[in-house]
Image (cartoon, rainbow, N blue to C red):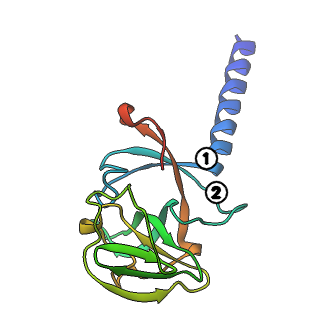
């Protein structure tokens, strides 16, 4: 009997070690808001790569989760999920329903309405900062709002890369 107990204990320790190693690289997350529709929906279960930017640069189009200063209903700070539109040194503007980066109109087939409401004069993304927007532009609190503004790269939790649930959306997040 003691041999069986040792084998069980060994297997449990190995499983826990594997889980801890995986959790250093991947973070499961549930989408709570509708600001990324139609790309992501409320209650989508996604995985974040926590190490994506340790070895690589943030790229325009990446979907990132970051810490914000906004408070949730329970009084804790909220994490937000948005798409990177501008990286350090980029100029970003909104004119006539379209987003321009470095004076080039973005082709954004991922946006919910295909239209970005409002006008925004050209601004330059500072070093260490990101300009982020939700795909559901009419219902997204993002870098256009002074409460969010430029997002410091230091606040990034990870890059969304895989949707586990719902199963009809199973696969890579783009």
Q: Residue at x 38, y 55 (%)?
A: 110
Q: Is residue 49 above or below residue 9?
A: below
Relative height, residue 123 to residue 25 (above, below) = below
- Tags 1 and 2 in contact by the CB under 8 Å rule? no
The residue sitting at 73% across, 26% down in the picture is: 10
- 92, above or below 75, in the image: below
At label 2, counting other C-alpha atoms closer than 10 Å, the crowd grade (few under 14, some 14-19, many 20 or more) is some
Give the quadrant of the N terminus. top right
Decide which of tag 1 and tag 2 comes sooner along the chain: 1
The quarter of the picture where residue 8 lies is: top right
Q: Which mark is residue 52?
A: 2
Rendering quarter of residue 145: bottom left
Q: Nearer the viewer, mark 1 or mark 2?
A: 2
Callout 1: SS = helix
Front residue of this view, candidates 103 and 133: 103
Give the image location of residue 171, x and y in percent. 48, 37
Q: Taking 85 as reference, is 32 left or right?
A: left
Q: Nearer the viewer, residue 81 or 113?
A: 113
Q: Where residue 42 sits in the image (x, y, percent)?
A: 29, 50
Q: Which residue: 59% across, 65% down? A: 59
Q: Which residue is mark 1?
A: 23
On screen, residue 112 above or below 17 = below
Residue 108: which numbered mark, if any? none
């Amino acid at each position: 009997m003691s041999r069986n107990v040792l084998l069980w204990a060994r297997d449990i320790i190995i499983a826990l070690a594997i889980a801890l190693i995986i959790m250093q690289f991947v973070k499961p997350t549930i989408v709570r808001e509708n600001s990324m529709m139609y790309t992501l929906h409320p209650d989508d279960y996604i995985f974040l790569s926590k190490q994506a930017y340790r070895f690589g640069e943030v790229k325009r189009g990446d979907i990132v989760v970051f810490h914000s200063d906004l408070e949730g209903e329970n009084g804790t700070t909220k994490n937000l999920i948005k798409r990177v539109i501008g990286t350090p040194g980029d100029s970003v503007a909104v004119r006539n329903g379209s987003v321009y980066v470095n004076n080039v109109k973005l082709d954004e087939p991922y946006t919910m309405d295909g239209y970005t409401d409002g006008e925004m004069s050209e601004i330059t993304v500072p070093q260490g900062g990101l300009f982020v927007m939700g795909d559901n532009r009419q219902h997204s609190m993002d870098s256009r709002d002074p409460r969010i503004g430029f997002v410091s790269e230091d606040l990034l939790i990870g890059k969304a890369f895989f949707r586990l649930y719902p199963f009809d959306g199973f696969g890579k997040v783009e």
